[in-house]
Image (cartoon, helix red, strand yellow):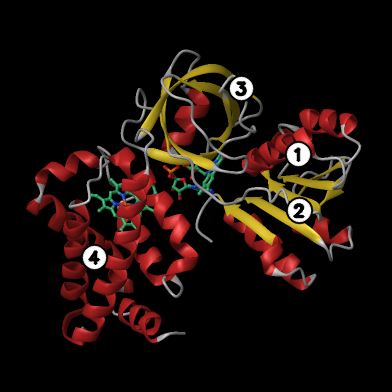
């Protein structure tokens, strides 16, 4: 661990147990000094009170190797234009962060800690601002909902089309989506479930989570004709067209969305690479897109699909977590891996792949939550 990283982690332990209070103070500081910034944030902030603070702390703490995060931070900066964030807001937020840390760490706080947080925050902010400034696209696209299909208890497949400009992205990427009619100023990320096409349509697979604000609006309330807002594409879980290795895709639930986009891209040029898809869900109902996958597998001889249920004894097929199921097949010594789903599912699969000695450089993954 580098010195900067040690200082950041060590100093965070001084306030870690008071995160809620730190967050309260942090936002109060921002809004008192700059009341107009309140309008950038969701109307009700109690659901994810610490969202921005938590995100900044995670980013700062991950700063061991800023160049590794270069592309992510540039994309994040681009994406932040959807909140109407301007370059000078970064100083306000950085100042509030340091004030909040100083206040709650009390006497144990040191000048060294102050310097470490200030430096790390500035490196990140600079990269985000540069990313935003370099982007010539609009801050977000208005997209009309064309179809809305309920596929299970809590999953919907939605197609939409951006209205003004085409939205360029790569299969495997994701975007932030807002449903302004139902949940204004709340943005959540969803992966495109199709490869880019001439018509410019985009498909999303959305699961409504219990108390989830945006996903339940997308599944239960959004209708054909509604307008969504979609921000700049992000993510690096894309295909390397030069790779000749066979491919293994591991998807959990609606984690299938980016995998489906990758498969669709492969259908356009692949002749030589075997592609194995492992699609896991809790029960049969959650295997919401299996018929489509099976159709693709029937059409493309290089594609195979293994569905599995972790919690449905009546399912005729593989039983267990998808990571365990994957380990029953193989060998997987020389493949490119794509993994997508909930954080528990991704963690579990990454553990299995590590046990199978798959080199980390061959694995690309996206988690639908913190890992
Ligand atoms: C890169 C990326 C791509 C994504 N792609 C998709 C996609 O294609 N399809 C899709 O359906 N979702 C996807 N997600 C997840 C999505 O962004 C939201 O996190 C999810 O829909 C919940 O948002 P919400 O507003 O409904 O819930 P929130 O209002 O954010 O959360 C409300 C409550 O639900 C709980 N909660 C939130 N997320 C989870 C979770 N994953 N599991 C269990 N409880 C949870 C929270 O703890 C909270 O109590 C993706 C996430 C990421 C980071
Ligand atoms: C180092 C600087 C920053 C980092 C790493 C960062 C990171 C993030 C991340 C990862 C999220 C959650 C993702 C999302 O909802 O799209 C987020 C949300 C947000 N950020 Fe930032 N951000 C930074 C600076 C700023 C600044 C300067 C502003 C301007 C005031 C800002 C405004 C917001 C808003 C309004 C949200 C949504 C919060 C919510 O939904 O409750 N961010 N940020």
Sequence-wise, which precedes: disc 2 or disc 4? 4
Q: Quadrant of the C terminus?
A: bottom right
Q: Nearer the viewer, residue 87 or 278?
A: 87
* Labelled disc at residue 322: 2
Instruction: State whether label 3 is within 8 Å of ligand 1.
Output: no
Residue 198 occupies quadrant? top right
Q: CA distance from mark 2 to mark 4?
A: 38 Å
Residue beneath disc 1:
266
Q: Is residue 198 above or below residue 47?
A: above
Please rate how many residues cluster around mark 4, counting C-alpha atoms within 10 Å: few if below 14, some from 14 to 19, many from 20: many
* Labelled disc at residue 22: 4
Q: CA distance from mark 1 to mark 2?
A: 22 Å
Residue at left offset 31%, top offset 35%: 185
Residue 268 occupies quadrant? top right
Residue at left offset 78%, top offset 52%: 248
Callout 1: SS: helix
Instruction: State whether label 2 is within 8 Å of ligand 1.
Output: no
Q: Which tag is nearer the camera, tag 1 or tag 4?
A: 1
Residue beneath disc 3:
198
Residue 360 point in image, percent of width and height: 68, 68
Inspect this view and state whether residue 203 appears: yes
Callout 3: SS: loop
* Labelled disc at residue 370: none
Q: Is residue 95 above or below residue 289?
A: below
Residue 298 point in image, percent of width and height: 90, 30
Sequence-wise, which precedes: disc 3 or disc 1? 3
Q: Is residue 89 left or right of residue 69?
A: left
Q: CA distance from mark 1 to mark 4?
A: 47 Å
């Amino acid at each position: 661990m580098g010195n900067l990283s040690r200082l950041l982690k060590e100093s965070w332990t001084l306030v870690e147990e008071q995160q809620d209070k730190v967050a309260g103070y942090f936002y109060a500081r921002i809004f008192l000094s700059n009341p107009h910034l309140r309008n950038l944030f969701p109307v009700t902030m109690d659901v994810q009170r610490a969202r921005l603070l938590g995100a900044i702390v995670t980013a700062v703490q991950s700063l061991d190797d800023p160049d590794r995060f270069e592309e992510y931070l540039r994309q994040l900066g681009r994406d932040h234009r959807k909140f109407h964030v301007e370059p000078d807001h970064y100083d306000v937020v950085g100042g509030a962060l340091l004030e909040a840390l100083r206040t709650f760490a009390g006497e144990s706080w040191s000048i060294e800690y102050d310097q470490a947080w200030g430096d790390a925050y500035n490196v990140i902010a600079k990269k985000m601002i540069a990313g935003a400034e370099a982007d010539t696209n609009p801050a977000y696209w208005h997209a009309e909902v064309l179809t809305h299909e309920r596929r299970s208890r809590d999953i919907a497949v939605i197609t939409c089309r951006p209205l003004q400009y085409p939205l360029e992205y790569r299969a495997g990427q994701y975007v932030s989506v807002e449903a302004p009619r139902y949940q204004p100023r709340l943005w959540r990320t969803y992966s495109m479930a199709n490869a880019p096409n001439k018509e410019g349509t985009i498909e999303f697979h959305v699961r409504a989570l219990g108390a989830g604000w945006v996903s339940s609006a997308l599944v239960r309330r959004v209708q054909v004709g509604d307008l969504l807002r979609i921000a700049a594409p992000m993510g690096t879980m894309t295909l390397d067209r030069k790779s000749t290795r066979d491919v293994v895709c591991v998807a959990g639930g609606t984690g299938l969305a980016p995998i489906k986009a990758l498969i669709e891209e492969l259908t356009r040029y692949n002749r030589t690479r075997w592609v194995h898809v492992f699609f896991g869900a809790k029960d049969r109902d959650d295997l919401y897109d299996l018929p489509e996958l099976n159709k693709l597998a029937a059409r493309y001889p290089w594609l195979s699909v293994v569905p599995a249920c972790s919690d449905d004894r009546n399912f005729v097929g593989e039983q267990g977590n998808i990571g365990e199921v994957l380990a029953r097949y193989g060998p997987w010594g020389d493949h490119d891996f794509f993994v997508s789903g909930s954080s528990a599912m991704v963690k579990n699969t990454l553990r299995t792949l590590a046990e199978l000695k798959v080199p980390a450089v061959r694995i690309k993954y996206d988690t639908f939550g913190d890992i």
